[in-house]
Image: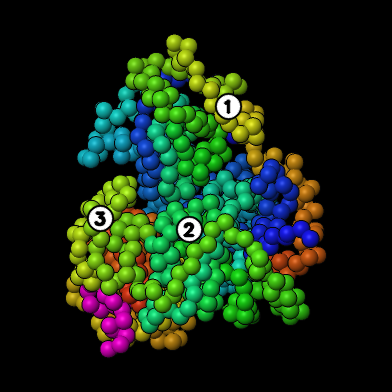
């Protein structure tokens, strides 16, 4: 008997979407769902119009404005002319090409990666693309989901396919039970700290292990969201009962007999026991402490219990220079305990951490407490209008407001400096988003990435804080 | 895509490593709805001093490079954010060829999709070509022959994927190519998937009830 090599979950989804092989390792892949937002789509629609083409499958496409939208109550009044034009262009393009659009004043509007799953658009085994690198979020459902460039957006709109090179397989197992106060965000940051910002380049990551299995869908989305920060093309979690229970009854999820048929197929979406991965990493959940970044790359991360590292101790020359530049930008001294770093701003939101569980985690810490006097602003921005309503039904908004936070409308907000929510130059922000790049939250802004509970703890004490102190008190 | 013919120009010397897409086009220029006009923001920080005044020392502000279509750079050109605006900015500046020691993957693909030829050459060749630029001598880049020719007759051969070469030479539109060559295969796939996984076809996005409105 010849030796058979098992398939990974990624191999399976790839195989099921191969329209045609183009060259060894390259195939034309069918795309099941296409999400569109205002920043990376105008030039694609423009090219489509110029060529006199139409959108091949409007029934598989969904658009939503998110990056540019203001999150203040009078949000339809957009002062920035360029933002306004970009938002208007999305509305016009959707009308012209008959693409379904969740408009800015629709109660379901929100960040594209929050509304896709929320509406049940995101389903196991699908291929999903969006002109946005954090499309990896949808991999939490066992869908192959990844970001694309604008010419590819045009290609998908016109043909519903992409010519793709097959990536390699990487498995990251997180085993055991995470400690008290340790969340999916801490796992994601610990993974990037371990393998580096380029550690998964050229790979699709499958997250496995008992700690991943125990995560809620919200936690799995946070984990998959950050795959791109490790260089991964996509991140995947095999679907299971948690996935099915979360999806059931959502507006775009199959129903009735079709639901039964779908889950029967979804149950076979897993890697074979004898599947071979090109690389494997195992992390013990119990060894992960709450994490916080100190530099300008998500890999420059450390447990909150430690210190700002000394670049002089780094052996690798390039890493040392990068660390020195990061500390200069962040205005930090080697050896400073992370818990002594004072902050000016707090941002709780973004496609990484703006779902209901994230808001509940932050509210648990903020309940009955107040924002520290040195903290100028705490922005709490739900990921969608529906998350906002749910939070309000649970009374979370009142907790936030009583604690001195601003409770906002849904959008990308302070995750990137494209809308009015920015961190002023030189100020330091404890942020639940995913990128701490130079200038990401505004020119000269300094970002520390952490979990929603850790962000809430920082809001209360005015400095980076081990949330476990507040949880046990 | 604009068909690629031979290009002869004085190469703009920009030999440094890790020129990222933020350097090529800063984030504040991403609010555009067009592929055109991005040349204005291209290499903004390299073209201007801190006070916003154009820097005469920058090659982009020197008359001899004004209409150049060739840029020569170091290692890992185009790294960082995936923004296709970087390729559009180069096209808007009139750049048709970037010669570098290596390119970041996504930039390389974005450049190709916009008709820019990316030529990978080893460091000594890069230095020599940059020196020609400094001296104000034109070089010729031939995609037919896959080589770069200097004024004194020195040539450097380069490699390129045959599919990519054909697309560039003929100015092929990738979407048109896919529809013409694979249109039937795509339709056949759709028919087969409808049978195999009908739920993918019975949950259309336009089943959502949507309100229509425009930002004021
Ligand atoms: S929240 Fe941030 S990372 Fe997510 S889609 Fe918006 S801008 Fe991108």
Asked if disc 3 is less than 8 Å from ligand 1, the answer is no
Question: For this rendering, which residue is in front, A90 or A19?
Answer: A19
Bin the neighbour count of mark 1 within 10 Å (Cα to Cα): few under 14, some 14-19, many 20 and up: many
Instruction: Give the Cα distance between marks 1 and 3.
Output: 50 Å
Q: Residue at x 26, y 31 (%)?
A: B55
Do badges 1 and 3 share one subunit? no
Bin the neighbour count of mark 2 within 10 Å (Cα to Cα): few under 14, some 14-19, many 20 and up: many
Bin the neighbour count of mark 3 within 10 Å (Cα to Cα): few under 14, some 14-19, many 20 and up: few
Question: For this rendering, which residue is in front, B177 or B162?
Answer: B162
Residue position marked by numbered label 2 in the rendering: A228
Label drawn at residue B4:
1
Tell me the subunit letter for badge 3. Answer: A
Residue A378 in view (yes/no): yes
Asked if disc 1 is less than 8 Å from ligand 1, the answer is no
What stretch of residues is rendered in magenta? A456-473
Residue position marked by numbered label 3 in the rendering: A313
> Seen in the image, is A400 located left or right of residue A310?
right
Tell me the subunit letter for badge 2. Answer: A
């Amino acid at each position: 008997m010849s030796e058979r090599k098992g398939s990974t979950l990624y191999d399976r989804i790839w195989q099921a979407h191969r329209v045609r092989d183009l060259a060894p390792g390259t195939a034309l892949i069918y795309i099941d769902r296409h999400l569109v937002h205002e920043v990376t789509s105008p030039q694609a629609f423009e090219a489509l119009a110029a060529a006199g083409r139409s959108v091949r499958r409007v029934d598989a496409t969904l658009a939503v404005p998110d990056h540019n939208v203001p999150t203040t109550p009078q949000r339809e009044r957009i002062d920035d002319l360029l933002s306004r034009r970009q938002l208007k262009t999305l509305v016009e393009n959707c009308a012209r090409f008959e693409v379904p659009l969740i408009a800015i004043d629709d109660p379901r509007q929100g960040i594209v990666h929050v509304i896709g799953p929320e509406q049940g658009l995101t389903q196991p085994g699908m291929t999903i693309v969006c002109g946005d690198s954090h499309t990896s979020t949808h991999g939490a459902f066992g869908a192959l989901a990844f970001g694309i460039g604008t010419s590819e957006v045009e290609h998908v709109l016109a043909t519903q396919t992409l010519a793709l090179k097959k990536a390699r397989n990487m498995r990251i197992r997180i085993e055991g039970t995470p400690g008290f106060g340790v969340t999916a965000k801490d796992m994601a940051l610990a993974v990037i700290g371990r393998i580096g910002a380029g550690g998964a380049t050229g790979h699709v990551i499958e997250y496995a292990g008992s700690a991943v299995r125990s995560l809620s869908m919200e936690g799995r989305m946070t984990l998959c969201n950050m795959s791109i920060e490790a260089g991964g093309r996509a991140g995947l979690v095999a679907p299971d009962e948690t996935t099915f229970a979360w999806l059931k009854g959502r507006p775009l999820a199959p129903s009735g007999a079709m639901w039964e048929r779908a889950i029967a197929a979804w149950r076979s979406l897993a890697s074979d026991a004898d599947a071979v991965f090109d690389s494997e990493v195992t992390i013990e959940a119990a060894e992960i402490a709450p994490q916080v970044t100190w530099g300008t790359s998500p890999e420059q991360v450390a447990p909150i219990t430690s210190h700002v590292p000394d670049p002089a101790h780094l052996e690798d020359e390039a890493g040392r220079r990068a660390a020195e530049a990061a500390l200069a930008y962040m205005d930090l001294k080697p050896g400073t305990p992370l818990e002594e770093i004072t902050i000016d701003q707090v941002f709780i939101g973004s496609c990484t951490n703006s779902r209901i569980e994230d808001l509940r985690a932050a509210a648990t810490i903020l309940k009955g407490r107040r924002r520290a006097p040195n903290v100028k602003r705490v922005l709490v921005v739900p990921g969608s209008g529906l998350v906002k309503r749910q939070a309000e039904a649970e009374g979370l908004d009142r907790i936030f407001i009583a604690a001195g936070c601003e409770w906002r409308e849904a959008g990308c907000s302070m995750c990137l400096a494209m809308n009015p929510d920015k961190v002023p130059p030189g100020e330091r922000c404890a942020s639940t988003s995913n990128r701490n790049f130079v200038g990401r939250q505004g020119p000269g802004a300094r970002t520390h990435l952490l979990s929603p509970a850790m962000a809430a703890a920082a809001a209360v004490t005015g400095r980076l804080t081990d949330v476990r102190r507040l949880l046990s008190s | 895509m604009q068909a690629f013919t031979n290009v002869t120009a004085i190469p703009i010397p920009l030999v440094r490593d890790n020129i990222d897409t933020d350097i090529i086009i800063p984030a504040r220029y991403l609010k555009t709805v067009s592929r055109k006009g991005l040349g204005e923001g291209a290499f903004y920080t390299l073209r201007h001093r801190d006070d916003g005044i154009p820097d005469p020392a920058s090659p982009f502000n020197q008359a001899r490079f004004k209409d150049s279509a060739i840029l020569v750079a170091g290692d890992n050109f185009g790294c960082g954010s995936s923004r296709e605006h970087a390729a559009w900015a180069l096209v808007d500046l009139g750049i048709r060829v970037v010669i570098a020691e290596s390119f970041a993957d996504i930039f390389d693909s974005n450049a190709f999709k916009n008709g820019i030829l990316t030529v990978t050459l080893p460091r000594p060749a890069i230095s020599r070509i940059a020196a020609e630029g400094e001296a104000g001598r034109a070089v010729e880049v031939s995609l037919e022959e896959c080589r770069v020719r200097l004024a004194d007759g020195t040539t450097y051969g380069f490699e390129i994927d045959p599919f990519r070469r054909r697309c560039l030479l003929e100015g092929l539109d990738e979407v048109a190519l896919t529809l013409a060559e694979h249109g039937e295969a795509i339709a056949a796939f759709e028919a087969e998937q409808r049978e195999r996984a009908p739920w993918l076809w019975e949950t259309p996005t336009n089943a959502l009830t949507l309100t229509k409105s425009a930002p004021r």
